[in-house]
Image: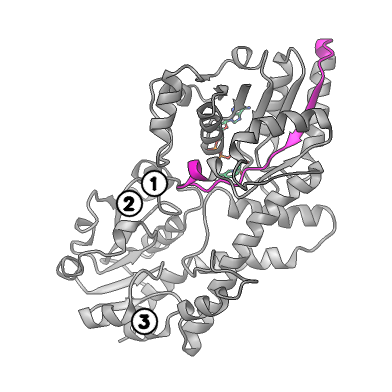
């Protein structure tokens, strides 16, 4: 098939490349000239394991091209995906202006029957607006092109995006007619072999499914963070509670980790939009609103522990941070808890020595107002040198079994604030660390010693 992927960010680049991998001809289109120029040279704008090799190979074999020119990509395309950003607006509602701009660009160049697929996460009802927008442009052009608008939300996870796209738990397609359904079924057939189902449903249900999925996952995180706070206060270990409840088949083990709160480009904005769409329709989304407020509070948990140990004024103190990206295996800094943590440490007068395996370039722009107070250190142990304590913020694998004796000799004081519960509290105490982690009262006790 001929495919045009409008928007070459995380979702567009991964999806476009995976469709090319299956033999389709794919144009990735973006309005960002610099990004497209880099991609033409094989340079990726993001870090995603396995993606660079796959992009370069498919480009070399002629199935994957990059352009800013819609007239090169749209005419003759069987399917045009819209995979542009939908950032939160002032009131938390998702901003669909990029989606509509992309829809107009497609409509200006369409030459025959095209399936236009909304892959961006969009508020319920957006597909209808996209349809009307395209119809209006075609009318102005005086062209009678047939088309269908389909909703196909994306569920890939950054860090394992290729695997998620190639072997999805499910593909959801909101679709109004058989013609578009046949095209989508054919397109996804290679990805839905071996028990990976494709679910066709009405368009609005598909649009809501994406928000409901992210809000459900965010709910699990906030719920566990709330229970962790209780464990920390009354005595208990959140890890034991996680095993105790997760082994119930109705609950399951995944997404039950306490930590420093969720971040990234999706959960925060999608939770906000769900609250906003409720408000637009006269519904108080009480559960979702609580999820957000617990998460905001949780982002401050490590700094609250630091303040408890060192006092409100952190002038003259230095703290090492391990992990800046919002999660491991990505360089994505959007809404990363590390931003809030560093902001607060610096505001209280501290210096920060930060290490992350991949996110330095992104972090420098997200922390631009603190560049005088933050050193980016290329070695995880060197980041500890002369620091008053370590704050572990993102659970990159290389932090799981570190050289504890190097840590002890590099840190000014043997104090670890672990925002991801990576270590055994008893072992840390034995090694001589003062160790704070989330929702494990033994550790809270050892931290306050
Ligand atoms: N990042 C994820 O993990 C993820 C997962 C599932 C769904 N989503 C959703 O997918 C959508 C895209 O997310 P992303 O993270 O890939 O965004 P992104 O910000 O990484 O990329 C968006 C790209 O779209 C381009 N763009 C904007 N307007 C354009 C236009 N009119 N024409 C062509 N290109 C245009 C931008 O230049 C940018 O390169 C969002 O709605 C997001 O919520 C993201």
Can you name the residue that lies furthest to the front here? 194
Confirm or deny contact between disc 1 and disc 2 (CB under 8 A): yes
Does residue 84 lie above or below 73 as drawn?
A: below
What element does badge 2 sit on? loop
Residue nearest the observer in this picture, 337 or 228: 228
Q: In this view, does 399 lie to the left or right of 100?
A: left
Which of the labelled discs sits on residue 46, or is there none?
none
Residue 18, x across and y down, in percent: 52, 33
Residues drawn in magenta: 140-163
User: 61 or 197, which is in the foreground?
Assistant: 197
Q: Using the image, tell me which numbered label, if any, was put on residue 356.
A: 2
Q: Position of residue 344 (x, y in %)?
A: 42, 62
Disc 3, SS: helix
Q: Residue furthest bottom?
A: 234
Name the residue that disc number 3 marks: 443
Q: Disc 1 vs disc 3: Cβ atoms closer than 8 Å?
A: no
Q: Residue 97: which quarter of the image? A: top right
Q: Distance between the residues labelled 2 and 3?
A: 25 Å
Q: Which mark is residue 363?
A: 1
Disc with the residue nearer the chain's start (1 vs 2): 2
Q: Nearer the viewer, mark 1 or mark 2?
A: 2
The question of residue 8 being in magenta is answered with no
Q: Nearer the viewer, residue 8 or 308?
A: 8
Q: Where is residue 253 in the image (x, y as percent from the top left)?
A: 54, 68
| 152 is within the stretch colored magenta | yes
Instruction: Give the total number of marks visible in the rendering.
Output: 3
139 relative position to 324: left or right: right
> In which of the image's four quarters is ligand 1 placed?
top right
Q: Which residue is drawn at 36% across and 73% down?
A: 306
Q: Is residue 8 above or below residue 237?
A: above
For label 2, the crowd category at 10 Å Cα-Cα, with few meaning under 14, some 14 to 19 and many 20 or more, is: many
């Amino acid at each position: 098939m001929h495919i045009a992927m409008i928007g070459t960010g995380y979702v567009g680049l991964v999806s476009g490349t995976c469709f090319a991998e299956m033999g389709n001809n794919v144009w990735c289109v973006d309005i960002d000239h610099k990004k497209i120029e880099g991609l033409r040279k094989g340079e990726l704008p993001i870090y995603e394991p396995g993606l660079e090799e796959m992009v370069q190979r498919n480009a070399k074999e002629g199935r994957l091209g990059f352009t800013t020119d819609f007239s090169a990509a749209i005419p003759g395309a069987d399917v045009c995906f819209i995979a542009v950003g939908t950032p939160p607006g002032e009131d938390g509602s998702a901003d669909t202006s990029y989606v509509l701009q992309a829809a107009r660009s497609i409509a200006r160049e369409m030459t025959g029957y095209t399936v236009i697929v909304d892959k961006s996460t969009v508020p319920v009802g957006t597909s209808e607006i996209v349809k009307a927008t395209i119809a209006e442009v075609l009318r102005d052009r005086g062209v009678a092109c047939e088309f269908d608008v389909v909703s196909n939300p994306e569920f890939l996870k950054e860090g394992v995006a290729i695997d998620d796209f190639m072997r999805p738990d499910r593909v959801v397609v909101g679709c109004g007619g058989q013609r578009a359904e046949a095209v989508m079924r054919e397109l996804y057939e290679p990805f839905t072999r071996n028990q990976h189902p494709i679910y066709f449903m009405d368009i609005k249900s598909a649009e809501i499914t994406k928000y409901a999925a992210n809000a459900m996952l965010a709910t699990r995180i906030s719920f566990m963070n709330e229970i962790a706070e209780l464990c920390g206060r009354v005595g208990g270990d959140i890890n034991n509670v996680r095993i105790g409840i997760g082994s119930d088949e109705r609950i399951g083990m995944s997404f039950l980790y306490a930590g420093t709160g969720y971040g990234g480009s999706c959960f925060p904005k999608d939770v906000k939009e769900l609250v906003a769409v409720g408000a637009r329709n006269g519904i108080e989304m009480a559960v979702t609103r609580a999820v957000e407020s617990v998460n905001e509070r949780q982002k401050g948990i490590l700094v609250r522990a630091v303040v408890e140990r060192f006092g409100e004024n952190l002038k003259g103190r230095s703290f090492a941070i391990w992990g800046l990206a919002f999660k491991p295996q990505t360089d994505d800094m959007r809404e990363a808890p590390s931003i809030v943590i560093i902001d607060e440490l610096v505001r209280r007068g501290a210096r920060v020595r930060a290490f992350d395996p991949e996110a330095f370039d992104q972090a420098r722009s997200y922390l631009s107002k603190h560049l005088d107070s933050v050193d980016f250190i290329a070695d995880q142990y060197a980041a500890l040198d002369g620091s008053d304590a370590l704050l572990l913020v993102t659970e990159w694998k290389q932090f799981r079994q570190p050289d504890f004796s190097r840590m002890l000799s590099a840190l000014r004081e043997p104090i670890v604030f672990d925002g991801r519960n990576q270590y055994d509290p008893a072992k840390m105490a034995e090694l001589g660390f003062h160790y704070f982690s989330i929702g494990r009262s033994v550790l809270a006790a050892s931290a306050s010693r």
